[in-house]
Amino acid sequence: MAILVTGGAGYIGSHTCVELLNAGYDIVVVDNLSNSSAESLLRVTELTGKEFAFYPISLNNRPDMEGIFRNHRIEAVIHLAGLKAVGESVSVPLRYYHNNISGSIVLCEIMQEYGVKKIVFSSSATVYGTSEHVPITENAPLGATNAYGRTKLMIEEIMRDLHVSDSTWSIALLRYFNPIGAHESGRLGEDPNGIPNNLMPYITQVAVGGLKELQVYGDDYATTDGTGVRDYIHVVDLAQGHLKALEKVMETTGVEAYNLGTGRGYSVLEMVQTFERVTGRSVPYKIASRRPGDIGVCYSDPTKAERELGWIAHKGIDEMCLDSWRWQTSNPRGYVVENEMLANI
């Protein structure tokens, strides 16, 4: 029996694959590589010493997806595949709706056909929209403010309706806050295309000299230094949360949402100062206007995950910054295959 990991070549997916393999699970990975690299999967094998099946296909490719379920005994699914850039989702919403929602529907239809009714879904704290109350609990009002967040919210609702129609389904909806950091080896990390959308890879690329300066969007929020506050969680802690959620869905039925965060918020400038302190590198920055839809403060209440999954985040902000920097300095061009690098010398 194997765990199907969709989006397993991505930032969170590759770290989750490492944790699954180290815990003794067999895995099958599906990833169309639209915003990830197959090199990450080679490094998963390097780090774990374990081989696994990989299919570079889209979830919307029904015949090939059905072939995976025919050829492998899939026991449960960890569903991380999806387009994820908030800004891009505003520009090309139909692409996000087609990819994220249609792909999830195809996946669930095939799971139902083959009697696989256990799934851990990669959702997002964006489903809370512009919540004014912190810390945010799973009972907070839902209302995403962009196409990306709405795809996550719609998929959550689809999965709730799926359980209403068939109570034998077991579903965990994991609402991530702000994943940062990298594998402690420096072999796995976040490899964004172009200018990063997320704070930490932006900071590390400025620190390594790839970008001139960090753009800080807004310094007039009601926070200690005027910059936005977010709940940053180490990607390895997040990956381990998937294992805890998997254990839960394997043993029970029902559908539950869980926040995966630390319960602590840090401002943008606190993150910059911490990074500079632990790495000794300077990060020049420039204050820019607020981005539409951004809110001042957002951090989680993760007590439900601790109570029901037995999961808590262990890694602190210093470790998040150091691991991010180790990844960046070890991989200044991200996942570039060594032969390609040699060819360009």
Image (tube, helix red, strand yellow):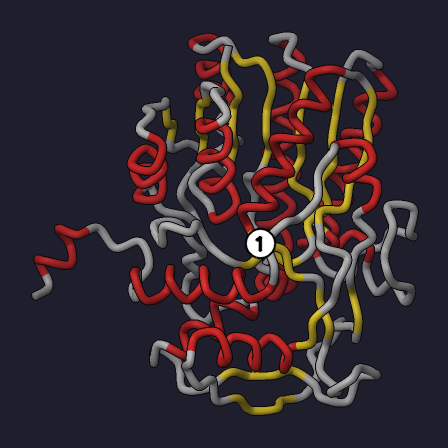
Q: Which residue is mark 1?
A: 234
Toward the viewer: 97 or 299?
299
Tell me what residue is drawn at x 29 percent, y 61 percent: 330
**Rendered view: 77 above or below 153:** above
Tell me what residue is drawn at x 86 percent, y 59 percent: 135
Toward the viewer: 38 or 90?
38
Tell me what residue is drawn at x 45 percent, y 41 percent: 14
In the image, residue 196 lies at what x, y percent? Answer: 49, 68
**Rendered view: 344 above or below 7:** below
Toward the viewer: 207 or 313?
313
In the image, residue 92 lies at what x, y percent? Answer: 59, 59
Count of numbered labels shown in the rendering: 1
Task: Check the picture and name the quadrant holding the C terminus.
Answer: bottom left
Image-quadrant location for residue 289:
bottom right
In the image, residue 179 lies at what x, y percent? Answer: 59, 55
Looking at numbered disc 1 in the image, what kind of residue is underneath it? Answer: His
Judge from the rendering whether residue 117 lies leftward or rightward of residue 82; answer left or right. right
**Rendered view: 269 above or below 15:** below
Judge from the rendering whether residue 297 lies leftward or rightward of residue 239; answer left or right. right
Secondary structure of residue under mark 1 = strand
In the image, residue 16 lies at what x, y percent? Answer: 51, 37
Tell me what residue is drawn at x 65 percent, y 46 percent: 97
Judge from the rendering whether residue 59 lies leftward or rightward of residue 149; answer left or right. left
Judge from the rendering whether residue 45 lies leftward or rightward of residue 297; answer left or right. left
Q: Residues within 10 Å of mark 1 (few under 14, many from 20)?
A: many
